[in-house]
Image (spheres, rainbow, N blue to C red):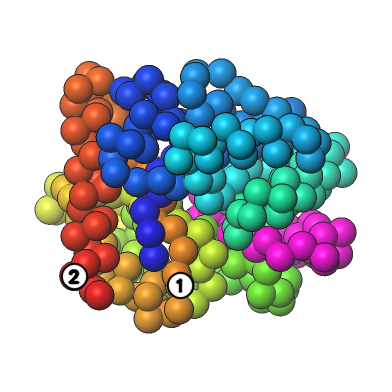
Amino acid sequence: MYISVRDAHLPGPFGSIHAGLKAMGIEHVELNYSKDKTVPSVDSDGRESLANPTAIEQYLYKAHGYGVKPCSLLLANNFGSEDLQSEIDYVIYALQAAAQMEIKAIRIDAYLSTQDQWPLEKRAQHFADCMKKILDATNNLDVTMGIENHGHKGNEQEFLDAVLNAVGSDRVGMTIDTGNFYWYGYPLKRVNEIIKHFAPRLKHTHMKAINYPADKRDIQREVGWGYGEHCSSLREGDLDLREIVKSFKQAGYIDDLCIENESLGRYNKDKQQAILIDDAAYLREILKAIG
């Protein structure tokens, strides 16, 4: 396993993606892939096109020149959209770009704009049907898709299990966000159990932490309770990330541990830099400890 970070964390405190990665002592980054087929620039706060093979080659040339290695694409798909075909095409384009970039996995959003209108069974089957269409259209590509446990309905274990079982493909698994099940309201012990449950289907990660008051950790909370105040650096969180990463290793996972720290907005740039540098250091300590 190796360490990566979400692109959005870096330009603010460090000035650019490549400067942030250098300061953190890592090389890999997850890139936000927009529906206009652009991703953030590695050396500015702008965006650059991945709309065709030539543009992708040019982007990679620059990235590699800075020692930057894109390891995943983050998508904001919505399979509840009225224009469903455009959402499916968006994922297909991302998979094609990822294949040329030699990226092994992309992040799929579990969000559905229709989630409050449809019962669990309908939501899960619809999502699975969309994934099957994408698989059929990209069966020549060696890129996997990790569905992130994201949003009010996308953190339901029952929904995620139903989708993965209905799809039944090794190319579709999980982007496990270590903080989102906790954000959803599950008690701490239950969060650890759910993460271990999904570890064998892991394709990508978001390493996130929350530090709740002691009397709130082991009870069922309302969705999102106190998140803005209590989201934290990785070292300060309640989750035992060492045991979680160990469970990933035991499940055969060998890819990135992607830092996502949503506490950064509470701090100035100097503090943001220190937190991100320590997040990377903490994950290095964990990887060294588990061998």
Measure the alpha-carbon separation of dots 2 and 1: 16 Å
The mark nearer the N terminus, 2 or 1, is 1
Above/below status of 261 relative to 249:
above
Q: Position of residue 226 (x, y in %)?
A: 28, 38
Q: Position of residue 236 (x, y in %)?
A: 16, 48
Residue 253: which disc?
1
Q: Nearer the viewer, residue 154 or 115?
A: 154
Q: Give me the residue at 56% from left, 50% from top.
A: 72
Above/below status of 286 relative to 30:
below
Q: Amino acid at mark 1?
A: Tyr
| Quarter location, residue 16 | top left
Badge 1: residue crowd in 10 Å (few <14, some 14–19, many ≥20): some
Q: Give me the residue at 56% from left, 28% from top.
A: 40
SS label for mark 2? helix
Q: Amino acid at mark 2?
A: Ala
Residue that badge 2 annotates: 289
* Segment tinted magenta in the rendering: 125-154
Q: Is residue 105 left or right of residue 14?
A: right
Above/below status of 270 relative to 174:
above
Q: Is residue 188 left or right of residue 199?
A: left
Q: Give me the residue at 35% from left, 46% from top.
A: 26
Asked whether residue 152 is in view, the answer is no
